[in-house]
Image (tube, rainbow, N blue to C red):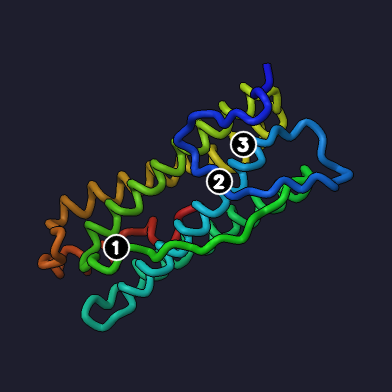
Amino acid sequence: MSEPSGKRLKTNLPICKTHRVFVGSKVKQNLPAVVEESLCGVSTLIMEIAYRLQALGKIFEQDNLALPRVASFFQLQSEREQEQAEAMLQYLNERGGQYCNKDIKRPGSEAVCGLLPALELTLAQWKEEMAVMMELSQLAREHSDPHSASVVKSRFLTPLVPKVKLLGDLLTNARRMGCTADGASGYGEYLIDQLQEELTSSA
């Protein structure tokens, strides 16, 4: 059963509260308003994640940290998140939906001063992104939009699984090397930067 008109579903999804539905679309078909609003809001969330990863990359380019492979890793992941955001916007456009331009929040990574907290922050945001994608897919199924449910699962949720595993492995190795939250264990971070192949070969 579709959502009653005028009633907003209770959800943890970053729904676009100021969303303006494009009523003149000729291609829109079976795209529930709540799914369109969620796609709009989630795409902004992915952009914010990309911005945060880019900021982390810049932190490790600074001369007081100087971990070039770590910096490249975060920059690469930022670019891939941006690609995902653009892919979601493209899908929204193909379904006849509309994206509402919004301000992107500041990264909130200013206090990061070492590899360990950077990895923990990234793992937390990817796990949050996974939870959001699962909820978005479920929301689409509940509102009789199996196409959106399938696209979200295959295109946006599935690629997050190996990324979360990769971050878990990197965190384990960082702790094994003695990395600390304040970045005091510089030698451990240096070894991770030089020896961790996943920093340059991650999918």
The numbered dot on residue 154 is 3
Amino acid carrying label 3: it is Ser
Amino acid carrying label 2: it is Lys
x and y percentages locating residue 203 in the rendered image = 50, 52
- Disc 1 crowd, CA 10 A, few/some/many (<14, 14-19, 20+): few
The structure residue drawn at horizontal position 21% and vertical position 80%, both measured from the top left corner, is 64
Amino acid carrying label 1: it is Leu
Horizontal side, residue 72 vs residue 156: left or right: left
Q: In which quarter of the image is the N terminus?
A: top right
Residue matched to label 2: 17
Residue at the extreme front:
6
x and y percentages locating residue 74 in the rendered image = 40, 64
Horizontal side, residue 187 vs residue 23: left or right: left
Number of numbered discs present? 3
The reply to whether discs 1 and 3 touch (Cβ–Cβ < 8 Å) is no
| Among the 4 quarters of the image, the one containing residue 15 | top right
Quick one: 129 or 143, which is closer to the camera? Answer: 143
The structure residue drawn at horizontal position 11% and vertical position 65%, both measured from the top left corner, is 185
Q: Earlier in the sequence, mark 1 or mark 3?
A: 3
Marks 1 and 3, how far apart in space? 32 Å
| Among the 4 quarters of the image, the one containing residue 85 | bottom right
| Among the 4 quarters of the image, the one containing residue 154 | top right
- Disc 3 crowd, CA 10 A, few/some/many (<14, 14-19, 20+): few
The numbered dot on residue 80 is none
The structure residue drawn at horizontal position 45% and vertical position 55%, both measured from the top left corner, is 202
Residue matched to label 1: 195
Marks 2 and 3, how far apart in space? 26 Å
x and y percentages locating residue 81 in the rendered image = 52, 56
| Image height of 150 relative to 101, above or below | above
- Disc 2 crowd, CA 10 A, few/some/many (<14, 14-19, 20+): few
Q: Which of marks 1 and 2 is nearer the N terminus?
A: 2
